[in-house]
């Protein structure tokens, strides 16, 4: 690997989110226009590095993609280099192997001087392994969950908040017509940021986040009280990771070859039945699912993606490697990749927005 940079690779890993193309555009254009580097686009995240699937990106490739959702490079959240499924044994059981060596070979073969890894904590953990083996990496944090450590906002989050808020607003009108308790389940894994922000934005009556375990009796009393006081409907924004006091999160499925195999989902259905049974109110649950990850990024995410992509290239140019560009106190800065990998930034239960919501009568499912 040469000291100065002539050629970089860029990949998008993990679950997609709006704004990925804005980053790819910024990285590619800044690298070519400002520094004259060559850029390789790696297909399907770390999977493309394992399988040696990559192509040269030109200015034309990076043109006209700023507003597009998804990622022109494709992504995968099933490629864990140190635990990669290479086939099955005689009994049909999957066989896993550490394939990090393959990545090193492919990076060297292609002459990539550094990799820009756009991803969440899973991709950053993969990048840490590569860094340990001498590959120079620069991380750019993405996720609708907004749960990246040391980064106060990730691109993709505000678009997902807008999508979830619109869905909640729509549920509001039908809930009101039918005098129902309506539960809307949001993504976010173990963090409640998306539910908290969209719930607050749409004026949800109850907001249930993983960081504040709920008591179903409290939620039922709240719905019944509203109904007794002439508010014949209740909107409950519930995070997929919400759990009862002393209980567990609801697991939808296990994706064995993913860096984080657990997929959450279904808590809104469980709660829907419990509330209906205990209050005799009519209840319905809607799981928003992947609709929250799709669509065109809002202007904020396009701008943030552009700033982060540009900052990542600037750091590489200055000879800084193995960092993640992050937002802290509203400004772009950087932290070591190891500080971000395998960690989650959860909502503090005394977050100012939670206090503001409580002050306007929102129930968080706990006894206070
Ligand atoms: O991390 C992003 C995210 O959308 C989570 O909010 C959600 O729990 C998970 O990914 C869903 O993963 P998949 O796309 O594998 O179903």
Image: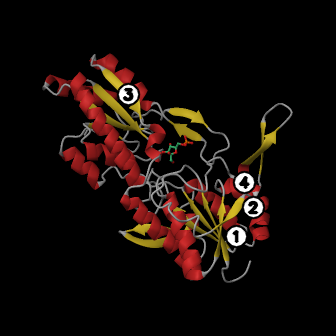
Q: Earlier in the sequence, mark 3 or mark 4?
A: 4
Q: Earlier in the sequence, mark 2 or mark 1?
A: 2
For the point 37% across and 37% down, the residue is 238
Please tell me the numbered disc located at residue 82.
4
Q: Earlier in the sequence, mark 1 or mark 3?
A: 1
Q: Which residue is mark 2?
A: 103
Between the C-alphas of marks 2 and 3, the distance is 44 Å
Between the C-alphas of marks 2 and 4, the distance is 11 Å
Residue 181 drawn above or below residue 195: above
For the point 48% across and 55% down, the residue is 68
Please tell me the numbered disc located at residue 285.
3
Q: Are marks 2 and 1 in contact (CB under 8 Å)?
A: yes
In the image, farthest residue toward the right: 90
Please tell me the numbered disc located at residue 135.
1
Residue 309 drawn above or below residue 196: below
> Looking at this view, is 320 or 15 the one in front?
15
Q: Are marks 2 and 4 in contact (CB under 8 Å)?
A: no
In this picture, residue 344 sits left or right of residue 79: left
**Residue 223 falls in image quadrant:** top left
Please tell me the numbered disc located at residue 199.
none
Between the C-alphas of marks 1 and 3, the distance is 47 Å
Q: Are marks 1 and 3 in contact (CB under 8 Å)?
A: no
In this picture, residue 314 sits left or right of residue 207: right
């Amino acid at each position: 690997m040469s000291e100065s940079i002539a050629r970089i690779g860029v990949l998008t890993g993990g679950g997609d989110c709006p704004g990925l193309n804005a980053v790819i555009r910024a990285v590619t254009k800044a690298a070519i226009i400002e520094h004259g580097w060559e850029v390789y686009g790696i297909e399907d995240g770390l999977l493309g590095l394992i399988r040696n699937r990559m192509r040269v990106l030109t200015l034309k490739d990076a043109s006209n993609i700023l507003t597009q959702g998804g990622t022109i490079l494709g992504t995968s959240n099933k490629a864990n280099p140190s635990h990669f499924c290479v086939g099955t044994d005689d009994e049909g059981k999957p066989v896993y192997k550490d394939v990090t060596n393959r990545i090193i070979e492919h990076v060297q073969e292609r002459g990539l001087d550094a990799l820009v890894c756009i991803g969440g904590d899973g991709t950053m953990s993969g990048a840490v392994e590569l860094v340990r083996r001498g590959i120079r990496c620069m991380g750019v944090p993405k996720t609708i969950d907004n749960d990246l450590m040391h980064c106060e906002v990730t691109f993709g989050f505000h678009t997902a908040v807008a999508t979830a808020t619109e869905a909640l607003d729509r549920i509001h009108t039908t809930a009101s017509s039918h005098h129902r308790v309506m539960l809307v389940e949001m993504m976010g894994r173990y963090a409640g940021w998306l539910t908290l922000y969209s719930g607050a934005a749409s004026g949800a009556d109850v907001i249930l986040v993983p960081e504040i375990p709920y008591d179903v009796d409290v939620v039922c009393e709240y719905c019944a009280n509203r109904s007794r006081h002439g508010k014949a409907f209740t909107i409950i924004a519930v995070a997929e990771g919400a759990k009862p006091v002393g209980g567990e999160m609801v697991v939808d499925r296990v994706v064995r070859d993913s860096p984080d195999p657990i997929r959450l989902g279904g808590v809104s259905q469980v709660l829907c039945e419990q509330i209906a049974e205990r209050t005799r109110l009519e209840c319905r649950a809607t799981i928003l699912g992947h609709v929250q990850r799709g669509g065109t990024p809002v202007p904020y995410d396009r701008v943030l993606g552009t700033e982060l992509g540009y900052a990542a290239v600037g750091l590489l140019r200055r000879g800084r490697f193995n960092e993640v560009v992050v937002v802290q106190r509203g400004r772009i800065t950087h932290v070591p990749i190891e500080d971000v990998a395998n960690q989650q930034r959860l909502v503090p239960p005394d977050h100012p927005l939670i206090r503001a919501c409580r002050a306007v009568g929102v129930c968080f499912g706990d006894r206070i």
